[in-house]
Amino acid sequence: MQRHDVASVTNAPIVAPRAFSPRDTQKVGGVALAVWVVGGCGCPVLHSMKKMLAAAVSRVLGGGAQKPASRVLVASCNYSNDATFEIKKCDLHRLEEGPPVTAVLTREDGLQYYRMMQTVRRMELKADQLYKQKFIRGFCHLCDGQEACYVGLKAGANPSDHAITAYRAHGLCYAYGLSVQSILAELTGRRGGCAKGKGGSMHMYGRNFYGGNGIVGAQVPLGAGVALACKYKGSNEVCLTLYGDGAANQGQIFEAYNMAALWKLPCIFICENNRYGMGTAIERASASTDYYKRVNFIPGLRVDGMDVLCVREAAKFAADYCRSGKGPIVMELQTYRYHGHSMSDPGISYRTREEIQNIRSKSDPIMLLKDKMLNNKLSSIEELKEIDVGVRKEIDDAAQFATTDPEPPLEELGHHVYNNNLPFEVRGTNQWIKFKSIS
Amino acid sequence: MSTPRGSLESDGRFEETSLDASSFTPLFILVTVREAINQGMDEELERDEKVFLLGEEVAQYDGAYKVSRGLWKKYGDKRIIDTPISEMGFAGIAVGAAMAGLRPICEFMTFNFSMQAIDQVINSAAKTYYMSGGLQPVPIVFRGPNGASAGVAAQHSQCFAAWYGHCPGLKVVSPWNSEDAKGLIKSAIRDNNPVVVLENELMYGVPFELSSEAQSKDFLVPIGKAKIERQGTHITVVSHSRPVGHCLEAATVLSKEGIECEVINMRTIRPMDIETIEASVMKTNHLVTVEGGWPQFGVGAEICARIMEGPAFNFLDAPAVRVTGADVPMPYAKILEDNSVPQVKDIIFAIKKTLNI
């Protein structure tokens, strides 16, 4: 008996129930499709359904795609629903046990992680391009290479968990729900940006996402404070507090460690160790580069930050730990950034091109996931290419918006100085220039 | 060919230089502000073994803004020190080293990050000589870029002239051009007191003529003395740092309309040279102050208050006017940022308003 996977844009069964086993709900192109397994091959109803489906899938998978949908349908005959992988064991500090050493990846999750990572990658590369074209000004710190960290953390934590990070924020912004369009438009300083053009690259905020912070290390006590609020409110939520290997030497981080441990705050301290703090290699800045062991009284994990499954399992483990009321935990993600520190740093005066190329060819997070999925029949090259096409379109559309949306109106220069305040006047560059300030 | 070569001495004499190559000093050379600061530090590092530089990326990266380019290659690890990202910690370490007799130059990558360390600057450096009854000097220099740049948004654009200028025990200087930059950094390093040097990132790449006098290794710009960059009769325009250039531009424009501005470059925020400003106001009867920082409790506010307390008040024909940054955290979008920093047009407008034109 031939098995056909049939995608329907509604969840209602189309043919006889006994032939259906609702298996995976795929998120492809952001739209939930129910994937049904149908028996039989010669049924004319099935045939016309397939055509309808081909049209639907084609619409969903992206714009001008001509034929791919039917190829997807044909190819999808042979997909597995999930596969189990061995993942790298985490180094542990003051922990008896760590995250599991195997992880199950469903086809649905795999496609989602792939899509998200590819979106972050393409978005960052688009930002690079827009910066060189001078649509983006000031600082722009890109995170390509680190995609597995953001997607893995989001996958392992609960949807209602909180997060905060430093200035290399675009990837986490996307993972935490900001659209590519709102991110790119903020980078180009337009009114459609997530901060209305007022903040720029380093100051993007979202629901349960506290930026985007420019001062190195300052976000860590803030994250501990969010965790305090979670505990205070009894919300069973945790705060993912990200900082870099450079920031790890900030005193305020140790102050935050101490109070988080003392008060058992549900704070996951996450050190993104990408080996360089701006132009300084970790060995030149840190007396100890075992960032997960920094705190004598807080347990820690060292995680392979290039493997999205590893990050996910570690995040799940860490979040469970915090949620159980045991207090904070430290997670070190070993990762790598392809770009220099920022767009004004070529990134090759303090590291070699060979090193960068080596990581790209052996440890690229998107490549690693892709290989896993292809080798275990969780997807096909064609299907992943479809996703790439869809992602590219999403990014291009967003960039189009970001370069054509108007700048914020001058009248709004004074807005949002205070919250919940009566309107007042803000002084401009001299006493005769006044801007209205509303909350 | 009998074109004389030489230099103008301070007493007005023209000293002809012999054509012997070893004694040839060019009359003027073009030097960027960045190069001027680099030269100033290089000369002082060479002159005094106790001088050293520390900060983030100052050594192997050649400086985040390349101001310390070449210094680590020349002086090595002992005297040019890369620090971790630990402002409070390394500022404290620098102050301690100064207390024990060394002469540190402590760089903040921008003065925004000095807020993390401000306790060490104020409580450990500025106040100590006083608190110790004159026993413990702190010969330290804190330097770095200050104020707005271009598109770096709210947390990276603040001007700290008013904050540091507020504190007794500190000296605060704010160079505009290359001569200011070189002369002031050298004076700051030689001064036995804590000196805050507020540089400007947008000025780093701007070239200025450096006179042969200023090229000398002993050239110093005195702390506490303002400079009249342009003589004028109708109005006094006082500024510091990058806006000085804007004031000169405004003066050029207004000159065509018959308005002659006297432009004063403060050079030092604290101790403020109010006498030069007063003498000028007593001549022109009008005053406009220009700064990049926020208006409230700012440098311009202090100048206005002091004018009222001194002899120049009776010479004012109109209230003094301040041109400042807008009273908001610095927005990112270009149109908003452009309207949050004083532009040449704002200065011209303020001058005309003051002169009732």
Image: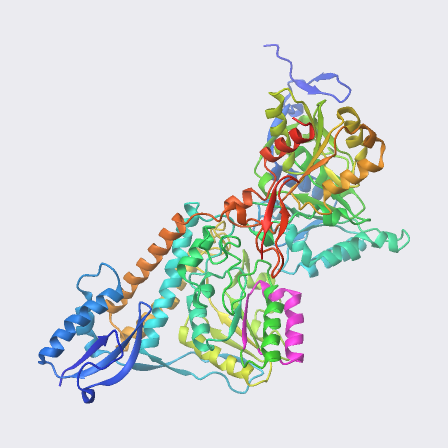
Query: Horizontally, is A141 left or right of B119 in the view?
Result: left
Residue A122, picture quadrant:
bottom left
Q: Say above or below: A258 vs B39.
A: below
Q: Say above or below: B311 vs B86.
A: above
Q: Quadrant of the N terminus of chain A?
A: bottom left
Measuring 60% from the left and 64% from the top, which residue is drawn there?
Answer: A217
Residue B218 is inside the magenta segment:
no
Q: Which residues are magenta?
A: A238-266
Camera-side residue: B112 or B20? Answer: B112
Residue A255 is inside the magenta segment:
yes
Residue B325, picture quadrant:
top right
Camera-side residue: B125 or B272? Answer: B272
Query: Horizontally, is A338 left or right of B60 in the view?
Result: left
Measuring 53% from the left and 53% from the top, which residue is drawn there?
Answer: A198
Q: Position of residue A392 (x, y in %)?
A: 31, 59
The coloring applied to the image is rainbow
Camera-side residue: B281 or B28? Answer: B281
Query: Horizontally, is B169 left or right of A240 in the view?
Result: right
Question: In this rendering, does residue B97 appear at all?
Answer: no
